[in-house]
Image (cartoon, grey):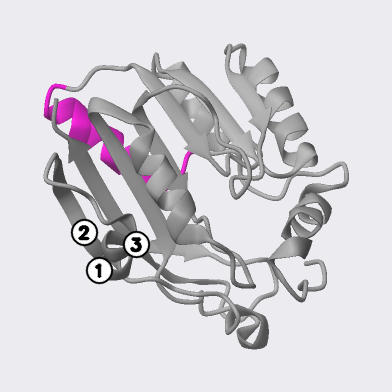
């Protein structure tokens, strides 16, 4: 992991370095909480529409949504991440829109039936509440917002580094969002899932706790 910057001004370069190089950092699979949420929405009668993936990284969620029929826009602050996401989409034969945005400065245009914000956390303070409120504002009437965060460090983490990262509760996320009466909160809880750490870590297997908020904007 690159050296942690002193302030939010250094975050774009930090993310760029994190995603630089020829390999991939993540599995390429969709995040588990997104898969759960889409299944829940389908059970409620939702059908694929326009989706926005904030902090798309290497494109696992973008590709998965596109394969399920969604019209997907993915954004990330790192050019390297956007490039890798574009390669992943091409390899799977799906058409998606991928853009580079520093979400504290610019935001994608349009409204979306699903806005997906997975693990928008950083090792230094940044204006995350404002970004989350812009994410909510981008949800079309009848659409949904999914915000998922690490609720605690993984058991194999470098605790000194992890201590700098905020681990918001669902209640804190809802307070930051300040949703109006047109919103219905469908899920707000901490949920565990099994996970494997890097090879050679102690322990290599354990559980991760996610803070999950899923909200519906009434039509």
Residue 159 occupies which quadrant of the picture? bottom right
Tell which tag, 2 or 1, sits nearer the viewer.
1
Residue in the image at 58% along x and 39% along y: 56
- Provide the secondary structure element on which disc 3 rests: helix
**Is 101 situated left or right of 138 in this image?**
right
Task: Kindly identify which residue carries mark 2.
Answer: 188
**Kind of element beneath mark 1:** helix
Q: Quadrant of the C terminus?
A: top left
In terms of secondary structure, where does tag 2 sit?
A: strand
Reply yes or no: does residue 102 show up in magenta: no
2 or 3: tag closer to the N-terminus: 3
Q: Do we see residue 190 in this rendering?
A: yes
Q: Is residue 44 magenta?
A: yes
Query: Cα distance, mark 2 to mark 3?
Result: 13 Å
Residue 172 drawn at (x, y percent): 31, 69
The location of residue 210, given as percent across then percent down, is: 37, 63
Labels 2 and 1: the sequence-earlier one:
1
Residue of label 1: 171
Task: Categorize mark 3 by other alpha carbons within 10 Å: few (<14), some (14-19), many (20+).
Answer: some
The kind of secondary structure the magenta stretch mainly shows is helix
Query: Residue at image x 26%, y 56%?
Result: 178
Mark 2 and mark 1 residues within 8 Å of each other at the beta carbon: yes
Q: Nearer the viewer, residue 215 or 206?
A: 215
Point 48% across, 50% down: residue: 131
- CA–CA distance between discs 2 and 1? 7 Å
Task: Determine which residue is flagged by label 3.
Answer: 176
């Amino acid at each position: 992991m690159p050296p942690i910057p002193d302030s939010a001004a250094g975050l774009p370069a930090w993310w760029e370095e994190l995603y630089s190089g020829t390999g991939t950092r993540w599995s390429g699979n969709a995040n588990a909480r997104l898969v759960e949420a889409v299944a829940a929405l389908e059970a409620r009668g939702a059908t694929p529409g326009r989706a926005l993936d904030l902090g798309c990284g290497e494109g696992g969620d973008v590709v998965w949504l596109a394969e399920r029929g969604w019209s997907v826009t993915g954004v990330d602050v790192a050019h390297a991440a956007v490039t890798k996401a574009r390669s992943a989409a091409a390899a799977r034969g799906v058409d998606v829109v991928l853009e580079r945005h520093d979400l504290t400065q610019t935001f994608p245009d349009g409204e979306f039936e699903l806005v997906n914000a997975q693990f928008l956390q950083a090792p230094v303070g940044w204006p995350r509440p404002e970004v989350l409120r812009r994410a909510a504002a981008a949800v079309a009437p009848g659409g949904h917002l999914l915000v998922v965060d690490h609720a605690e460090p993984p058991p194999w983490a470098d605790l000194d580094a992890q201590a700098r990262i905020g681990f918001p509760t669902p209640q804190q996320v809802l307070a930051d969002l300040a949703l109006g009466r047109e919103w219905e909160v469908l899920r707000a809880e901490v949920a565990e899932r099994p996970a494997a750490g890097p090879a050679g870590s102690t322990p290599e297997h354990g559980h991760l706790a996610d803070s999950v908020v899923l909200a519906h904007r009434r039509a």
